[in-house]
Amino acid sequence: MTQIIGKLYEKLWRKVGGKPWTEIVREDQKASPLLYLLIFLGLGILVARLAGKNWWPILVGFLLGILCGHFWW
């Protein structure tokens, strides 16, 4: 099953730009970091508004996700 998904993913990224989407996003983020900061700020505000009183566990989840993504990247 994972081989099928891997082949599908490879076909998709070959059509998009010839490299994995993580590299495409990383290059785009380096070219315009302010845009990405504003996008994530807006998403954070939206999630905080939708979360209401449950904002604290969501904030901790985002923090853990950022840390894991930072160390993995």
Image (tube, grey):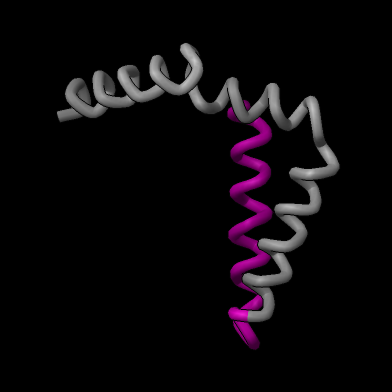
- Tell me which residue sits at (63%, 71%) in the image: 47
> Is residue 60 in the magenta section?
yes
**Numbered range of the magenta stretch:** 50-73
The extreme front residue here reads 15
The quadrant where residue 27 appears: top right
Query: The N terminus appears in which quarter of the rendering?
Result: top left
Residue 66: x %, y % from top left: 66, 45
Residue 12: x %, y % from top left: 35, 24
Residue 54: x %, y % from top left: 60, 81
Q: Is residue 58 above or below residue 39?
A: below
- Tell me which residue sits at (73%, 62%) in the image: 42
- Tell me which residue sits at (85%, 42%) in the image: 34
Along the line of sight, the residue nearer the viewer: 65 or 46: 46
Q: Would residue 41 appear left or right of 23 to someone viewing this image?
A: right
Dominant SS in magenta: helix
The quadrant where residue 14 appears: top left
Q: Is residue 54 above or below residue 38?
A: below
> Is residue 28 in the magenta section?
no
Residue 26: x %, y % from top left: 66, 26
Q: Is residue 46 above or below residue 54?
A: above
Q: Would residue 12 appear left or right of 69 to someone viewing this image?
A: left
